[in-house]
Image (tube, rainbow, N blue to C red):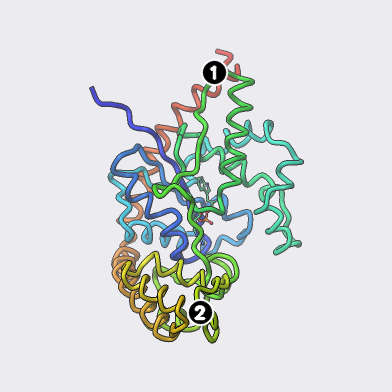
Amino acid sequence: MAVKKEIVMSGIRPTGFLHLGNYFGAIRNYVRMQEDFECYFMVADLHSLTTHPDTTELRSNVERVLAENIACGLDPDKAAFYCQSHVHETAELYLYLNMLAYMGELEKTVTFKDKVRQHPENVNAGLLTYPVLQAADIILHRAKYVPVGKDQEQHLEMARNYVNRFNHRYGEVFPEPQAFNYNAELVKVPSLDGTGKMSKSENGMSTLFLSDEDDAIRKKVMKAKTDSGPTEMNAAKPDYIENIFNLMKLVCEADVIAKYKADYNNCSIRYGDLKKQLGEDMVKFISPIREKINTILPDKAYLKKVMEQGAEKANESAGKTMQLVREAMGLKYF
Ligand code: TYM
């Protein structure tokens, strides 16, 4: 008899080009987890409407996220890879969970407060209940593990709160989902300018995209913030230098990193050389992914097939969960 695999779910918003943060925070784990788990990976098109109400470019953005994930190794025959809007029961579960989500805690969510600061003209209710929709995505498949980057930690904590409230009120239906990374600590890939993290929508010069051309990669890395170097042996590293070493850990060989660390500690480091090396290693890492994106993206028939196949698998799983949910809640009258 086949052993039932544990369930994994995660999502990415189609709000721009995917970058190194998306790769190391999320997609790298998708590709590994699809071998050992029952996986549901999703393009979060409904979530993108909370900040991007103009839908003229939505289709091409969705196709891009599909192609970029597949180029990184996501296999739509192994994982269910689908679009959030193709699974209508998400909206039903979102509605039920909204009754278990309290205004006070939603208003305190860090991502909500950030968005309010960035776009005071569009503080809509969808933005406020964004974490509720995300919880619905996850528990719709009764997922236990959620591969995400560090920025999603609070959303996962909120999902666990809703699960506990639901289970307590209506009976045990959902497992508690947890953020997951094989290397234990959740990842935050820093931006090249030393402030914050790489992001789809902020300063493009400080984010390395998976579809960047080689020259753009080199140029961005050379512009990363450094200084004239340490003047004392074994000095503490300023944040922006620490960031560069963190980026090196993602793509450079261990002996290369060790050499530059030693150079830093004995004050002989040459940041120009370090950045040249990092630029070349980034090119080596990103260019094969970019080439694959460029071959997958024009194949619209294939991408449509991926979406259809994914929607079918996701709807099957969602349908089963929602039967349990309606029964547990007493919403079945005949
Ligand atoms: P999104 O689209 O902002 O990001 C997608 C994934 O990439 C990770 N990530 C990063 N990891 C490390 N360093 C970075 N600089 C970095 N930038 C992004 C994110 O943590 C995420 O794993 N709310 C989600 C989308 C979502 C979702 C879900 C996720 C909707 N429903 C259900 C998990 C489960 C988001 O905005 O991701």
Q: Nearer the viewer, residue 256 or 331?
A: 256
Q: CA distance from mark 1 to mark 2?
A: 56 Å
Helix, strand or loop at mark 2: loop
Please give the label number shown on residue 159: none
Residue at image point 52% right, 66% down: 190
Q: Amino acid at mark 1?
A: Glu
Count the marks: how many? 2
Please give the label number shown on residue 327: 1
Circle 2 is placed at which residue position?
A: 224
In the drawing, does residue 128 fall left or right of residue 60?
right
Q: List x then y, in percent, for residue 194.
A: 56, 72
Q: Is residue 110 visible?
A: yes
Quarter of the image where one finds residue 314: top left
Q: Is residue 332 above or below residue 174?
A: above
- Would you call the spot at circle 2 few (<14 residues within 10 Å), some (14-19), or many (20 or more)? some
Q: List x then y, in percent, for residue 295.
A: 29, 67
Q: List x then y, in percent, for residue 57.
A: 51, 64
Q: Quadrant of the C terminus?
A: top right
Q: Quadrant of the N terminus?
A: top left
Quarter of the image where one finds residue 299: bottom left
